[in-house]
Amino acid sequence: MSIAFPDGFSWGVATSAYQIEGGRHQDGKGESIWDRFADTGRMPESGDIACDHYHRWQEDVDLMAELGVTAYRFSTAWTRIIPDGAGSPNQAGIDFYSRLVDELLRKGITPWLTLYHWDLPQALQAAGGWLNRDTVDAFVRYADVVSTALGGRVKNWITHNEPWVASHLGYGTGVFAPGIDDLGSALTAAHHILLSHGRAVPVLRENSQGCEVGIALDCRPSQPASADPADVATNRAHDGFRNRWFFDPVLGKGYPTDITAMCDERSVFEQPGLPFLRPGDLEEIAAPLDFLGLNYYTGVEISEGDEDGMGVVLPEGPNQPDGYTEMGWEITPQVLTDYLQHLDEVYRPRSIVITENGASYSDGPDESGVVADHRRIAYLDQHIRATAAALAAGISVRGYFVWSLLDNLEWTSGYKQRFGLIWVDHATGRRIPKTSYYWYRDFIRNASRLSP
């Protein structure tokens, strides 16, 4: 017995602007919150050069063409398009992405463009960032500028990548840029990010006729560590803050009432309720989507006290036990199948695209220059099979994107975490396709059938 992927299934790779581009001070690019975060010592390395994709993009597109992917998910840097976030567009930045899109199309690779992968212009952050409702309007204008320039050629749009990360890690715990540590701020930022998504959807459709629009939500599916009522209740809270707070409003269910009640119980805001919520906001956030993007890496067990955390995650490093990646995340492919079924049953999205899935392993070149990353191959194989199992169950999954094309700047982990199919020497920029690159290439060539 074998499982067929549907005709037109998108096999891709994904990257983000800050993590790969570099070219920080070139061609009018402005300062982002991540530039400031690095400059103030909050990161081990900066994205000033990163993978130098800004200068080596043609080489990278050639590598994608050789890989045989049918789609490439990338993000535009807001600061390259509108350096201060709200002023005049920067034609040099627009031209860079225009050249990239043209080359992708010439090589038969469909561009999937993400507008926001966390790199807010620092000028907007100085005015409050995502805590300021005016940033919603600035984002919609940015979406308008990009889609006006590229909408005739780009037909797959993602408004935001992982709003939970941008809001909770950026404004709730402060471990990511801009470094604010306050739950109320995280929920406020999340709302404005989601509102900007909803308001941008019709703009993208107007400027890019016949396009498809979605959002990439990350998830951390969880289960209680035991049947103890405290663990069960904590798991429900974790799922509320981590998953439902984003999936529910985007897919038309509003904010989860149990979590809003919990906010009141904890006096997260000075007055009961959600002070950032205005009439009509939820209707705008729930703008109909053509696809739901899902970023999946791992599932977790939750014990009492973990509702605002990540579950059990081991410290980062290369000496993980079997069954864990070097990010300290457990390898749980079955949870991907289960969560796809959950999304289909609860929300009924038109379709789902796995917009990110991958694993960090630090394997480097051996004496003959081969990067034999067999653990990554095993991880990808398991998760592609998990995706196939969801398809076999009748769930409309129509794309799978490996994170990532390149070993890139993994935010506050610097360059030590390597998710790429291509090894990058960050001192020289040299690229070496890994064994997993060739495995994925061969898999794509034969992807019409997958033996279970």
Image (spheres, rainbow, N blue to C red):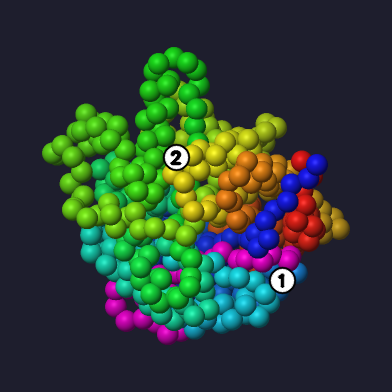
Q: Residues within 10 Å of mark 1 (few under 14, many from 20)?
A: some
Q: Is residue 89 above or below residue 180?
A: below
Q: Is residue 136 above or below residue 371?
A: below
Q: Name the residue carrying label 1.
A: 65
Q: Is residue 362 visible?
A: yes
Position of residue 306 measured from the top left corner of the image (x, y, whole percent): 42, 28
Which SS class for mark 1? helix
Q: Quadrant of residue 237?
A: top left
Total count of labels: 2
Residue toward you, 240 or 379: 240
Q: Amino acid at mark 1?
A: Ala
Q: Earlier in the sequence, mark 2 or mark 1?
A: 1
Position of residue 413 measured from the top left corner of the image (x, y, whole percent): 53, 49
The quarter of the rendered structure image containing the N terminus is top right
Q: Residues within 10 Å of mark 2 (few under 14, many from 20)?
A: few
Position of residue 437 measured from the top left corner of the image (x, y, whole percent): 74, 58
Which residue appears at 29% of the width and 78% of the height? 87
Which SS class for mark 2? helix
Magenta residue span: 67-92
Q: Quadrant of residue 147?
A: bottom left
Residue 346's label in the rendered image is: 2
Q: Amino acid at mark 2?
A: Val
Which residue appears at 63% of the width and 61% of the height? 10
Decide whether residue 81 is among the magenta residues: yes
